[in-house]
Amino acid sequence: MASPRRVGAETSKTRHVLLDGVEQLMRDEGYAAVTYRAVAAKAGVTPGLVQYYFPTLDDLFVAAIRRRAGRNLDRLADALRTQPDRPLRVVWEFSRDEVTAALMTEFTALGNHRKTIRSEIAAIAKRIRKVQLDAVKKRWRESRADDGDLPPDVLLFLLTGIPKLIKLEEGIGVSTAHAEVVEAFERYLDSAEPRPGGRKRKRKSLLTTGGRRA
Amino acid sequence: MASPRRVGAETSKTRHVLLDGVEQLMRDEGYAAVTYRAVAAKAGVTPGLVQYYFPTLDDLFVAAIRRRAGRNLDRLADALRTQPDRPLRVVWEFSRDEVTAALMTEFTALGNHRKTIRSEIAAIAKRIRKVQLDAVKKRWRESRADDGDLPPDVLLFLLTGIPKLIKLEEGIGVSTAHAEVVEAFERYLDSAEPRPGGRKRKRKSLLTTGGRRA
DNA sequence: GTCTATACGGCGATAGAC
DNA sequence: GTCTATCGCCGTATAGAC
C-alpha cells in the first residue's frame, strides 16, 4: 500500500477535517491544487501536521478516496434497498450526482498518472460495479428482455459511463448535445421503469438502424 | 492566447523535435511528466532552449495540441472523403485510434485543470465535432430512420464517447465489459453500414426496453 | 499521539548575459 | 538565438517539543 511510517489515528477529528479540505480543493481547483501547504492553510494548521497524518501525498489521496468510496457505497446500497423496483434509475441518478461524479472524475484522472492510486481506484470501481451489476441483472431476470436488448453489463456501462462523459466534456467547456443525450436516455428509462405518477409509455428503443438499407 | 514574448520560429526543426518529445512523454508517462528538463533531456538540448521556444508550459502544451489536432483533422477529413459510404464506421474507428485517443484523453484531462488550455481543447473539439456531425447528418438524411432512431448528435456522442470511456477505464486498469460494449456497438454498425464482404444483417436494435411492463 | 521547525533538491518562471 | 542565474513554491525527510 502506502507508507509504513507512524501516522495519526484514523479516528482523529483533525484527520477528517483535513480530508474535508482535500475534497473541497479537488472539487474547486482540481487535484493539482492539493498541496500540503494548501490543505494546511484551509484547516488552519501547519503543513507539517498534515504530513504527520499523511506522510506522502499519495497517502493523502488514498485516504480521501477510501473515505469517499465508503460513503458512496453506503448511499448506493441504501438507494437500491429503498427503491428495489427501479435499479436502473437508481444507478443512473447515482452516476449523475454532482459532488460524487466530480470527485470520482478527479480521482480517476489522478489514478491515470499515479501508480499507487491507480490500484486503489480500480478496486473501488470494481466494488461499486459489482453492486450495480447485481441490481441490473436482477431487473433483467425479472422482466425478461427480447432479443434486441443489451446485456446487463453493456447497459450498466452506458448507465454509468454517459454521465461521466458529460462531466468530462463539461470540464473543458463543451456541452453540445448533452441535453439531448440525457433526454434520449431518460425516455428509455421511463419506458423500462415507469415513474409512479407518470403515464404509461410505449416500448421504446434507444438505438436502432433505420431499416431502408440496400 | 498564451505568452506575448519573443519565441523561436514556427518552422524551426528544433521546435518540431521538441514537440515530438512532448507527445512521447505524454503518451508514456502522462502530462505530469512533461517538464522543461525532461523535454530538453529527450531532445539533447538545454532546458533553457526549450523555454526559449515555449516561454511557459502552457505554451508548450498548446503548441502540441494544435499540431496534433491539425494532423487529426486532416486524417479524419481524408477518411471521410475516401470512404463516403460509411461515415459512422469512419468516426468510430477514428475515435478508437490508439495514439490519437491516448493523446486527446491526456489533453482533455489537462484542459480540465489549466484555464488557458481548456479553451484550446474546446475549440479543437468543436471543430472536429462539426466535421463528424456533418457526415453523420448526411447519412441520416440519406437513409431516413424510423421513429425509434437516435438523432445524429446523440448517435455521434456515443460514437465518439464510448471509445473515450473505454480508454479512461483502461487507464486505471479496469476493462470489464469493454469487449461486450464494442461488440454490441459494432453489431449495430454492421447493420447500419454493412461491410463490403459481409453478409446482409437484419435490422438490429442496440437498446430497447424488454416490454413486459406492469 | 500531536504537532512544529527546518533543510534539501526539483520545479516553473523571469531577467538578463553572451 | 542560445544559455545562465536566480527566485519562490513544491514534496519530502528528519529532529525534536509538548
Image: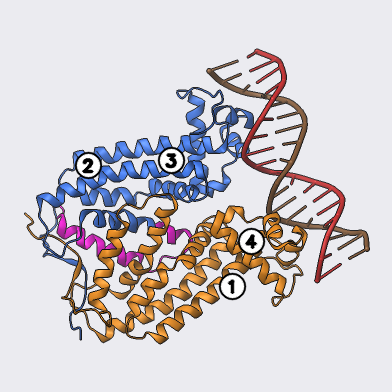
Chain colours: A blue, B orange, C brown, D red
**Which residue in the structure is indicated by mark 1?**
B67
Q: Which residue is mark 3?
A: A120
Magenta stretch containing residue A169, yes or no?
A: yes
**Can you give x and y, in whole percent of width and height, for residue B59 in the image?**
65, 64
Whether discs 2 and 3 lie on one chain: the answer is yes
Check the residue under mark 1 and report the chain it is in.
B
B30 sits left or right of A77 in the view: right
How dense is the environment of label 2, judged by Cα within 10 Å: few (below 14), some, or many (20 and up)? Answer: many
Boundaries of the magenta span:
A166-195
Query: Which amino acid type is marked by label 1?
Result: Arg
Q: Earlier in the sequence, mark 2 or mark 3?
A: 2
**Quick check: marks 3 and 1 in contact, CB under 8 Å?**
no
- Asked whether residue B33 appears in the rendered view, the answer is yes
Using the image, name the chain to which the residue with label 4 belongs.
B
> Looking at numbered disc 2 in the image, what kind of residue is underneath it?
Leu
Please tell me if label 4 and label 2 are on a single chain. no
Same-chain status of marks 4 and 1: yes
Q: Few, some or many C-alpha atoms within 10 Å of disc 3 (few <14, some 14-19, many ≥20)?
A: many
Q: CA distance from mark 3 to mark 1?
A: 35 Å
Q: Which mark is residue B58?
A: 4
Quick check: A39 above or below A161? above
A175 within the magenta span? yes
Residue at disc 1, secondary structure: helix
Give the alpha-carbon distance from disc 3 to disc 4, as whole Å.
30 Å
Q: Earlier in the sequence, mark 4 or mark 1?
A: 4
Q: CA distance from mark 4 to mark 1?
A: 14 Å
Please state if B3 lies on the left or on the right of A113 as rendered: right
- Closest to the observer: A82 or B45? B45
Q: Nearer the viewer, mark 3 or mark 4?
A: 3
Mark 2, residue position:
A80
- Within-10-Å neighbours for mark 4: few <14, some 14–19, many 20+: some
